[in-house]
Image: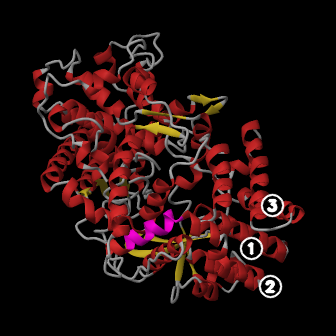
C-alpha cells in the first residue's frame, strides 16, 4: 500500500487535469519529468532515492501546514481543488432533500460555518456528556462505552466487523485492543527522550482540553492524570506493532457465552445489545490478554476516573468538529507536537477530509464518469494482466519451492480478483441524514451510518464486490480474505505529465511495480501467504517450503533492521516485513513484465536514460517526497511501512538489474554482496 488488516482509505479522485499516464508514445520535444527530477550531484549507487528525486525535493519545500510533501500530496491538491468547486456549487443549489447533491452541499456548508460552530461550543456533544455525567455504577460505564462505539469513539475496547479469517464466506465480529489517546503502546512505555517528552506534552494537552470544556485548572489537571494513568495500564497490556501482524496469534474464536472468562462480571449479551449487536453466538478476540486487563481496570478505577477517561475520548474524537479553541489546541498537539506542522491546513480541505470519511463514494460517483474513462480503465486492466503473467513465470522458475507448493501458489495467483479504477456497484447512502444545523452532528450521523452498515452485515453473505477505498483515493490494497487487489483511479495519476509524454518504462516502474506488482505480492508476503486462494487462513505450504520461505523473510527483516533513520531509531524489520517483501516483489516482477514491451526491446534512450534506468526512476517517482522529523519518528513507531527513501534504496540494493543499469560498485552505500542480496519472489 502507499500508506498503511489492509484497508486504509486515505486521501482523495484523479482529475482530467492530471492527464492519465497510459500512452506508449513519447514526445521527444516535451520536457522529461524523470530527467528534471534528478540530482546529479548524488551518485545513484550511494543514494538512489535522492539521485532520482533530489531536484524535485529542493524545489518543493514542505508547506507549514503539512508534516510531509510528496507526489501523492500533489495529486490530492488537484483533487481538493475540483472537490471544492463541486461542494461550493452544491451549497448554492436548491437540491432535492435526500439527494446526493443536498447531502454534499449541506455537509460542506455546516463545516465551513465557523461562526455557528464557535457559537455551539461543545453543545453538539451534550447528550453524550450528560450520559457520562450520569454514570453511577460500573454497568453505567459499560453502557456509555457501548454507545460511544456506535458513534465512532473507541474507548476501552475496539469492536469491528470483518470477514472471518478462517471462513471468508462469513462476516464476524472482532474484539480488538484499543482505548488509547496516543498512537500506540510504545508511546506509553518507551524511555527515549523524544517519547518521554511527548508523554509530558500529552498530559498538558489533555488538561488544556478539559479546561476548554470549562473545568477549573485543578480539576482539569487531576482528570488529565486520571486519563494518563488508565491509558498507560491499557497500553502495557497491548501488543506491539509487529505482533499484530500475526494472523494466527490474533485469531481467537470464542462463544459469546465464554467471554466472561476474559471479563468476569460482564454480561456480554447485554453489552453487545447496547452496541446494537443482537443474536450473535461467536466473536473473534484479537488479544485476550488485553480484555483481561480491561476487566481489571473496570473494577480497579473509580467512577470519577472513568468519567474523565470517557469524556476525554469523546472530546478527542470530535475535537476537529468543535469550536476554534478546541480545534486549535487539538492541532497544537497532534499536528505540531506530534508531526511538526506549524499551521493548520485550510478549513475547506479539512472539511473535505471529513466528508470523504462520511460519504466518500457519493463524491466518487460524480467523478469517475468524467475523469477515469472506460478506455483508461481498460488500459490499466491490461497492465495488471501483464504483471500477473510475469508473476506466474516467476513462481514457475523458483528454485527453492517444490512443485506441490508451486501448484497451490499458482492457483492462488490465478484466482486473485483485480478491481481497477472504481466499483461496479456503489454504496447506497439514501438513509444518511445530513443538514446544516451542526457540523459535529453531521460527522456523528456519518459515523453512526457506517456503524450500522457494518453491523448489518453480520449473518449475511459476504459482498465480494465491495470496495474499501474510494476512486479518488491515492492508495491501493490487497485484501487477503477476498484474495483481491484493489487499485483506485487516483493511484495511477502523475501530476504534470500528459498522456503522450509517458513512456512504458516510467509507467511500469510507477504503476506496474510500486502499485500493481506490490499489491499482488502482498498475497504472498509473510502475512498474506498464510491465506489460501479462497481467502481463508489455512496452511497450503509443505513444511520444507515454509521453512525456506521464513528464512528468506528473516533475511529481509535483518536487512531493514539495520537501517537507522533518525537519532538512534531503527526501522522495525519485523513490523515492516510485509511491505518490504511487496516492494521487492513488485520491482522484480513488473521489471520482467516491462522487458516484454517494445520500448525495452528497442533499447533506445530518452533524455540520455536507457529504458531500464527509466524503469527504476519511474519506481522512485512513486515514492517522491520528504517529511518532518516529528512525523518520521511517529512513522517508525506506528507504521508498517518503511520511510519512502528506504522503500527505494532498500529493495534496489537486492536487484541485479539495478546494479547493471547504474554501474553500482563495491564501496558504494547501496552495494551489497551477492550472499546478502535478498531474493524471494
Residue 324 visible in the current orientation:
yes
Instruction: Indicate the position of residue 346 as horizontal and vertical percent values.
Output: 50, 50
Give the class, few, some or many, for how many residues have Cα within 10 Å of label 3's Cα (few <14, many ≥20): many
Residue 143 lies left or right of residue 552; in this view the side is: right
Q: Which residue is mark 1?
A: 295
Instruction: Tell me: 182 left or right of 346.
Output: right
Query: Residue 584: percent from the left, percent from the top?
Result: 37, 35
Q: Whole-Å distance between the Cαs marked 2 and 3?
A: 21 Å
Q: Give the Cα separation between the discs numbered 3 and 1.
A: 22 Å
> In the rendered image of this protein, does residue 561 appear above or below residue 37?
below
* SS class, disc 3: helix
Which circle, 2 or 3, is nearer the viewer?
3
Q: Residue at x 67, y 29 (%)?
A: 568
Residue for point 44% across, 65% down? 108
What's drawn in magenta, residue-wise? 103-113
Which residue is label 3 attached to?
224
* 2 and 3 marks in contact (CB < 8 Å): no
Position in image of residue 241 (x %, y %): 59, 50
Disc 2, disc 1: CB below 8 Å? Answer: no
Is disc 2 placed on a helix, strand or loop?
A: loop
Amino acid at each position: 500500500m502507499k500508506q498503511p488488516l489492509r484497508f486504509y482509505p486515505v486521501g482523495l479522485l484523479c482529475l482530467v487535469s492530471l492527464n492519465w499516464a497510459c500512452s506508449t508514445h513519447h514526445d521527444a520535444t516535451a520536457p522529461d519529468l524523470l530527467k528534471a527530477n534528478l540530482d546529479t550531484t548524488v551518485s545513484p549507487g550511494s543514494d538512489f532515492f535522492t539521485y532520482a528525486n533530489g531536484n524535485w525535493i529542493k524545489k518543493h519545500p514542505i508547506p507549514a501546514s503539512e508534516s510531509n510533501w510528496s507526489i501523492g500530496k500533489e495529486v490530492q491538491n488537484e483533487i481538493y481543488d475540483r472537490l471544492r468547486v463541486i461542494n461550493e456549487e452544491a451549497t448554492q443549489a436548491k437540491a432535492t432533500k435526500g439527494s446526493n447533491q443536498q447531502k454534499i452541499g449541506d455537509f460542506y456548508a455546516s463545516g465551513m460555518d465557523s461562526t455557528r460552530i464557535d457559537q455551539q461550543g461543545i453543545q453538539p456533544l451534550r447528550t453524550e456528556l450528560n450520559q457520562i455525567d450520569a454514570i453511577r455504577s460500573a454497568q453505567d460505564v459499560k453502557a456509555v462505552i457501548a454507545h460511544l462505539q456506535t458513534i465512532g469513539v473507541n474507548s476501552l475496547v475496539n469492536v469491528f466487523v470483518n470477514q472471518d479469517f478462517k471462513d471468508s464466506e462469513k462476516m464476524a465480529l472482532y474484539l480488538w485492543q484499543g482505548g488509547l489517546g496516543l498512537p500506540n503502546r510504545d508511546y506509553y512505555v518507551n524511555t527515549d527522550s523524544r517519547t518521554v517528552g511527548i508523554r509530558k506534552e500529552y498530559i498538558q494537552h489533555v488538561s488544556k482540553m478539559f479546561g476548554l470544556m470549562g473545568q477549573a485548572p485543578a480539576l482539569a489537571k487531576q482528570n488529565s492524570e486520571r486519563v494518563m494513568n488508565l491509558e498507560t495500564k491499557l497500553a502495557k497490556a497491548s501488543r506491539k506493532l509487529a505482533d499484530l501482524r500475526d494472523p494466527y496469534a490474533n485469531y481467537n474464536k470464542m462463544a459469546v457465552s465464554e467471554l466472561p472468562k476474559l471479563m468476569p462480571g460482564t454480561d456480554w449479551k447485554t453489552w453487545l445489545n447496547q452496541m446494537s449487536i443482537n443474536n450473535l453466538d461467536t466473536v473473534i478476540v484479537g488479544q485476550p490478554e488485553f480484555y483481561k486487563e480491561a476487566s481489571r481496570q473496570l473494577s480497579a478505577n473509580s467512577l470519577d476516573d472513568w468519567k474523565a477517561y470517557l469524556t476525554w475520548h469523546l472530546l478527542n474524537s470530535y475535537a476537529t468538529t468543535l469550536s476554534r479553541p478546541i480545534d486549535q489546541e487539538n492541532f497544537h498537539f497532534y499536528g505540531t507536537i506530534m508531526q511538526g506542522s506549524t499551521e493548520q491546513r485550510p478549513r475547506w480541505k479539512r472539511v473535505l477530509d471529513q466528508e470523504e470519511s462520511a460519504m466518500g463514494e457519493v463524491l466518487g460517483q460524480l467523478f469517475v464518469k468524467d475523469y477515469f474513462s472506460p478506455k483508461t480503465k481498460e488500459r490499466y486492466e491490461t497492465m495488471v494482466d501483464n504483471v500477473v503473467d510475469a508473476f506466474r513465470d516467476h513462481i514457475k522458475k523458483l528454485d527453492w519451492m517444490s512443485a506441490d507448493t508451486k501448484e497451490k501458489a499458482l492457483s492462488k495467483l490465478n484466482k486473485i480478483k483485480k478491481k481497477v479504477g472504481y466499483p461496479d456497484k456503489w454504496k447506497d447512502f439514501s438513509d444518511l441524514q445530513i443538514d446544516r444545523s451542526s457540523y459535529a452532528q453531521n460527522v456523528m450521523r456519518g459515523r453512526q451510518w457506517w456503524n450500522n452498515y457494518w453491523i448489518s452485515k453480520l449473518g449475511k453473505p459476504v459482498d465480494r464486490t465491495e470496495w474499501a477505498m474510494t476512486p479518488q483515493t491515492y492508495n491501493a490494497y490487497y485484501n487477503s480474505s477476498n484474495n483481491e487487489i484493489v487499485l483506485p483511479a487516483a493511484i495511477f495519476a502523475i501530476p504534470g505529465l500528459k498522456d503522450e509524454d509517458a513512456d512504458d518504462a516510467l509507467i511500469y516502474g510507477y504503476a506496474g511495480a510500486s502499485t500493481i506488482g506490490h499489491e499482488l505480492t502482498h498475497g504472498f508476503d509473510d502475512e498474506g501467504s498464510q491465506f489460501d486462494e479462497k481467502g481463508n487462513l489455512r496452511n497450503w505450504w509443505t513444511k520444507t517450503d515454509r521453512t525456506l520461505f521464513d528464512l528468506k523473510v528473516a533475511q529481509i527483516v535483518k536487512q531493514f533492521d539495520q537501517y537507522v533513520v533518525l537519532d538512534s531509531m531503527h526501522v522495525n524489520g519485523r513490523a515492516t516485513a510485509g511491505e518490504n517483501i511487496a516492494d521487492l516483489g513488485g520491482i522484480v516482477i513488473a521489471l520482467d513484465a516491462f522487458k516484454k514491451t517494445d520500448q525495452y526491446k528497442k533499447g533506445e534512450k530518452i533524455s540520455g536514460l536507457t529504458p531500464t534506468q527509466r524503469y527504476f526512476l519511474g519506481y522512485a517517482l512513486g515514492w517522491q517526497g520528504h517529511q518532518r522529523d516529528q512525523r518520521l519518528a511517529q512513522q517508525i513507531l506506528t507504521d508498517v511501512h518503511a520511510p519512502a527513501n528506504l522503500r527505494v534504496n532498500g529493495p534496489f540494493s537486492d536487484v541485479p538489474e539495478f546494479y547493471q543499469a547504474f554501474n553500482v560498485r563495491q564501496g558504494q552505500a547501496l552495494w551489497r554482496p551477492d550472499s546478502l542480496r535478498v531474493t524471494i519472489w
